[in-house]
């Protein structure tokens, strides 16, 4: 399947690399075709890997586009990708609206009564936005088995069919266990996962490692 | 030991009840002495239980005062408790600044670049504020073994000795495992745990139960 990946950073390269590894055709998009990191990635990744503009990557995608841009640049990247190129497709939104301009730890540029996931869905009503993977380090996104116990992922989105399609991709391509993926509800529930980041960055600092994730422990129903 | 508990709701009654059960003397404080819920709690809880104003409860405490008021009322409750009555004591802050006035799910009245824990510490610099327990349902606060697996708690505060004292109380009185309590750092890390609540309330909705908590799964150090 032809898939678009927006973003050439660590997250983009990790997602794009895994998708190629599981047999998909991937076009990595950036601000302008010929981005050095995108070219280097495509050259080393074989015939199923290509690169181009954000618009090229979005147009290339049959069904799935992964937003792996930094959250503070996502809206600009999507504008460059173009609503027409995204029309009816599923946008898997991995971005967090983290503002590092005032140093560490970062704050969020949007939270509490709105979220980046919602903003994207409002701006692109004909795109099927599914927020997920934004609560884990990039290495764990595509290799959840790297931790010694099962751990959890969340999905948010207005379109149940799109969420189901993304969950299949998480399970079949990235190795997540279906029963450890929690459907939180509509896209407004992105607030919950984006607002987990302030705790995540502090646990990263306390542990001196990004190699951790959350596991939900549930009780049995009261008698 | 004589301990003050501010608040007569479910959280206050749960904390106060457990403290009495483990042999402490507890005074429950409310806006005015004679609060019906506080009186009922004290009457059923035996000779170690008493009630009074917020100031009475704070003055009664030797070392530990638990802030179990609703987050939107905490600053007013602490003003009534009185800085002199809290001077040098440890304030265990369980409150979350949840605003339910616009319906469910709630938003936060403070977040991102500030937190309720920090506000309290700034207003009462001679009080040793330790934020903890605010990420779990009240029943789990004092009965962590009710879930089928170990799960985790966080502490935030500027005073390491005060944090250590509170961790001892969590372990010795409430039954938490020491190794499942994460010291996040200074009181500004309260932002992380208070901002977990938007995810918490959505998981509550998705699960139709508050009987859950987060467990941090860590990887081994990279080779």
Image (tube, coloured by chain):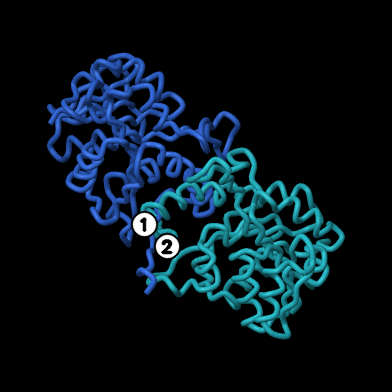
Chain colours: A cyan, B blue
Q: How crowded is mark 2: few (under 14 residues within 10 Å), some or many (20 or more)?
A: many
Q: Which is nearer the N-term, disc 1 or disc 2?
A: 1
Report the side of B170 relative to A141 (left or right): left
The numbered dot on residue A147 is none
Q: Nearer the viewer, residue B137 or A14?
A: A14
Q: Residues within 10 Å of mark 1 (few under 14, many from 20)?
A: some
Residue corresponding to mark 2:
A212
Secondary structure of residue under mark 2 = strand
User: Total number of numbered labels?
Assistant: 2
Q: Nearer the viewer, mark 1 or mark 2?
A: 1
Residue corresponding to mark 1:
A207
Residue B216 visible to an observer of this rendering: yes
Give residue B178's position: percent from left, percent from top: 23, 53
Instruction: Please say if B1 is above or below B50.
Output: below
Report the side of B63 relative to A98 (left or right): left
Quadrant the C terminus of chain A occupies: bottom left
Q: Which residue is drawn at 57% across and 50% down?
A: A194
Q: Which residue is drawn at 45% across and 48% down?
A: A199
Give residue A146's position: percent from left, percent from top: 44, 73
Q: Which of B14 and A217 is in front in this view?
A: A217
Residue B212 visible to an observer of this rendering: no
- Return the residue found at the far right: A84
Instruction: Please say if A185 is above or below B201.
Output: below
Give residue B115's position: percent from left, percent from top: 45, 34
Report the side of A106 relative to B89 (left or right): right
For the residues labelled 1 and 2, say whether their Cβ atoms are less than 8 Å apart: yes
Disc 2: which chain? Answer: A
Q: Residue at x 83, y 61 (%)?
A: A87
Instruction: Please say if A30 is above or below A43.
Output: above
């Amino acid at each position: 399947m032809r898939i678009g990946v927006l973003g050439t950073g660590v997250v983009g390269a990790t997602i794009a690399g895994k998708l190629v590894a599981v047999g998909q055709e991937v076009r990595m998009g950036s601000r302008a075709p010929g981005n050095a990191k995108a070219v280097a990635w495509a050259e080393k990744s074989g015939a199923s890997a290509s690169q181009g503009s954000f618009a090229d990557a979005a147009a290339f995608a049959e069904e799935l586009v992964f937003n792996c841009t930094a959250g503070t640049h996502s809206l600009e990247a999507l504008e460059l990708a173009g609503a027409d190129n995204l029309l009816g497709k599923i946008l898997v939104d991995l971005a967090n609206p983290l503002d590092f301009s005032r140093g560490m730890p970062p704050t969020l540029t949007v939270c509490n009564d709105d979220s980046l996931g919602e903003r994207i869905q409002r701006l692109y009503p004909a795109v099927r936005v599914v927020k997920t993977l934004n609560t884990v380090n990039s290495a764990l996104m595509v290799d959840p088995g790297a931790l010694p116990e099962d751990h959890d992922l969340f999905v948010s989105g207005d379109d149940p069919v799109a969420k189901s399609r993304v969950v299949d991709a998480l399970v079949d391509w990235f190795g997540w266990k279906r029963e450890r993926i929690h459907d939180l509800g509509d896209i407004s529930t992105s607030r919950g996962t984006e607002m987990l980041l302030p705790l995540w960055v502090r646990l990263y600092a306390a542990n001196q490692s990004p190699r951790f994730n959350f596991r939900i422990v549930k009780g049995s129903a009261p008698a």
